[in-house]
Amino acid sequence: MEFSGSLILFFSFLAMLALKIPISVAIALSSFLALLTVNSFGISAATIAQRMATGLDSFALLAIPFFILSGQLMNHGGIARRLIDFAEIFAGRFRGGLAFVNILASMFFGSISGSAVAATAAIGGFMNPLMEKNGYDKRFNAAVNITSSTVGLMIPPSNILIVYSLASGGVSIAALFMAGYIPGILIGLSIMFTAGIIAFRRSYPKGQSHTLAESMAIFGRAIPSLLLVIVVMGGILAGIFTATEASAVAVLYAFLLSVFIYREISYRRLPSIFLETAVTTSIVMFLIAASMAMSWVLSYENVPQNISSSLIKLSNNPYMILIIINIILLVVGTFMDMTPAVLIFTPIFLPVVTSLGVDPVHFGILMVANLSVGICTPPVGSVLFVGCSIAGISITSVLKNLIPFYVAMLFVLLLITFIPALSTFLPRLLGL
């Protein structure tokens, strides 16, 4: 039967997810089972192993463990608290000011660490109790923390944009990094606008205002943290080092900042931080390897080509195709984590959109913005789980409070979809 391999792949993958088998294992096993239908056992096993190994044979992927380590150092090194204080200078004086501080701090920390989960834990762990103490509803606090943490995936440095570059066959990481700024800021502003309306309707209190002297002192303490983005992105744009080399620079900077300048990390804590980084890196790398194997199986079964031809038959209007892809990805994002989704669906959808004239950089930002909604939604929303755990509430109790923020994020997603210049303006301006 034609496409029997792809059918077995699809149904075995869904069955394993239903059995709550880890998604990386489910991807690898379903890919192996699919190849059993078209190859002998020996060839199938060798092919899956080979594809998993070659999938990790990329210099660009070295950036991921380095950025994970820099994020861990920032998470434990007191950087989050200083960024929260810095955000309070700008937003604390308004009604609902602590919600704005939460959002701004998450944007700052997420953009520096490149991790939505790290931003959720670091900022939420400090801001949620403070907001609750000042009369904010804990479910609202969690909703703000969960959604704002995803903005760091758009603003560089971002691990998921590196993964997209790999899956797309080599789209410039520097161009993707610059492309994420405007959409990321727009998403952050939309979340702030939504939080402001809710805060006004619920009469949440105004936050603390600071004198000029206090503001300058807070700014001075935050400057070393904020300089990390300038060092990393400035070095990339100036051609001093590549995006991968920038990740190593980020580790060195975060180490010096956390250990010697802020002195919040002792030498005795470093082994546990390195171990945590190694565990996280191994999970991400195995996920990438398994997803690359699945992508090869899908290509072997001509699934991308068949989906491409089917989509093009529906319409040759690029915006209509992008709307259809957005809908598919929004559904996919509810049950699949962002990394495997990018690795599996980029080779499927990218040839379709590029044949219709869509810029690969624009499509990468669109994919990440879309799937950022998914990590905030059940049943497989990693940021949702962490945010609820930090806030000490159930997922079902926070969902109603998340809906207005979902609407805001989807509105910006539509803007990104229909206005490609939001993604491509900065890369083209800088000649990337």
Image (cartoon, rainbow, N blue to C red):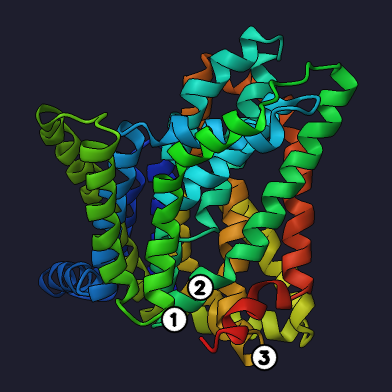
Query: Along the horizontal axis of the image, is 76 left or right of 380?
Result: left
- For image coordinates 56% across by 84% down, the residue present is 430
Q: Label 3: which residue?
A: 357
Closer to us: 54 or 423:
423
Closer to us: 189 or 236:
236
The numbered dot on residue 176 is 2
The numbered dot on residue 172 is 1
**Mark 1 or 3, nearer chain start:** 1
Q: Amino acid at mark 3?
A: Gly
Where is residue 161 drawn, in percent x and y?
A: 45, 65
**Mark 3 or 2, nearer chain start:** 2
Q: Amino acid at mark 1?
A: Ser
Quadrant assignment for the N terminus = bottom left
Task: Examine the rendered structure and indicate whether residue 268 appears above or below residue 369.
Answer: above
- For image coordinates 42% across by 54% down, the residue present is 227
Within 10 angstroms of label 1, few (less than 14), some, or many (20 or more) residues? Answer: some
Q: Are marks 1 and 2 in contact (CB under 8 Å)?
A: yes
Where is residue 290 drawn, in percent x and y?
A: 28, 60
Within 10 angstroms of label 2, few (less than 14), some, or many (20 or more) residues? Answer: many
Task: Examine the rendered structure and indicate whether residue 383 appears above or below residue 411.
Answer: above
Total labels: the figure holds 3
Where is residue 266 drawn, in percent x and y?
A: 16, 29
